Amino acid sequence: MFISKKHLSRRTVLRGLGTSVALPLLDAMIPAGTALAQTAANPQTRMGYIFFPHGAVMDRWTPTTVGSDFDMPEILSPAARFKDKMTIVSGLRNRPAESSDPHGIIAGTWLRCVAPNDVSNPEKGVTADQLAARHIGQGTTFPSIEVGTPTGGPCAPGFSCSFGSSLSFSSPQQPLPIENNPRKLFFQLFGQGDNAQERAAIVNETGSILDSILADANSLQRKLGSEDQVMVANYLESVREVERRVQMMKSQDLSGVDIPLAPVGIPEDFEAHLKIMFDLIALSYQINLTNVASFMMEKEVSMRTYNNVGVSEAFHPLSHHGENPAKMAKLARVQQYHTEVFTYFLEKLDAMPEGNGSVLDNSIILFGSNMSNSDQHNNDPLPNAVFGHGGGTIKGGQHLFYEQNTPHANLLLTLLNRAGIAEESFGDSTGVLAEV
């Protein structure tokens, strides 16, 4: 451990030619003999909102028992190893998201809990992630990041198409666009320059962001204790792996391609896309680039196929299962696959040591959808699972079941409060969920 009276700043970066790379929380950033909570290095709560479309087959999502001894449901089973850091919250309804033409507003009302046509109050309609960004995001480089895999989304007549293509709103009528290009996101997070052209030029000149900061990294390592040396080495190796994969994608950039309305699914590429976006969020959390992230794993009305898990039917038509047991089984398999990839993200966060635990321990990650039974297009009850302990503010390891018509907004408000954000109400909330 680094025990000198001198210590590194939490904002220490490695510098190279036109680039700089931030560092994770190290022991050397904590003055000797000082409690972590009394220093500027005290870990902030990270908040993540991970959205999947078309709801869930609810009897395969919801445990049959409540409390801490709950049975692990089929769709969430890939995350079973994180049961002690999992809180399943059942019975919640998002009434403001209900519509006769729901697909076009499902994404944009998930974190809003205000009807899309309600602009009566400039504070009502700001999404939960953006409220979080105002309070716990201002000390980071990016108050929030908004990412996903889709391009665009469905539109509902009479409403802005942004309600089908965005999760985040900084005001009732100001959506924040999703970045779905991992190359652009990587340059945004780790590159330097005033614009994309300058950042690309710097990387092309140096060949690698990490190569450009190698001398500074080697100099730092000589000053660190053995545990910090290992952490820095592992972190830089993670960045290099992401950088390598981004560079490989350069020749596969599809930004100029006219994607058909019903693309043939390529599961391998889709999974790689999901994982590299999760990698970038995880690295952003680890080095304090952001404390708030939202991620749209796929859009509503998706025509993607999932041949990799034995499902050749397109996602959206399959979601209209008509209570057919065979179709529901296939739909549940697709939803379980989404959990499998999401679990990869949880593993990343849990493998990042921080303070007295891991980045996951210091996080609040909501994994869910704004639709329940996709065949009925209803929003009651929603599938919600929270992961992480929020730095000790969330118990974890329990299934909570609330009475009919309890607002989904109550959960969003509760999670904000657990992150230290003292909002008294949110959307159509009626109170907090004290048991979370």
Image (cartoon, rainbow, N blue to C red):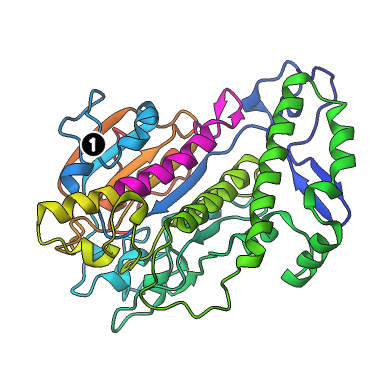
Quarter-of-image position of residue 357: top right
Q: Is residue 28 magenta?
A: no
- Give the structural element (helix, strand or loop) at label 1: loop
- Residue positioned most to the bottom: 158
Where's residue 275, x and y in %? 51, 49
Q: Residue at x 26, y 63 (%)?
A: 313
Left/right placement of residue 302 relative to residue 3 reads left
Dot 1, how many residues are within 10 Å of its Cα: few (below 14), some (14-19), or many (20+)? some
Q: Is residue 352 magenta?
A: yes
Q: Residue at x 28, y 38 (%)?
A: 88
Tell me if I can see residue 384 in this picture.
Answer: yes
Left/right placement of residue 249 relative to residue 88 reads right
Placement of 241 over or under 157, stated as above or below: above
Placement of 122 over or under 430, stated as above or below: below
Left/right placement of residue 183 relative to residue 406 reads right
Where's residue 289, x and y in %? 65, 49
Residue type highlighted by circle 1: Pro
- Quickly name the residue at label 1: 73
Tell me if I can see residue 412 in this picture.
Answer: no
Most foreground residue, 289 or 125: 289
Which span of residues is magenta-colored? 335-361
Where's residue 391, x and y in %? 50, 31
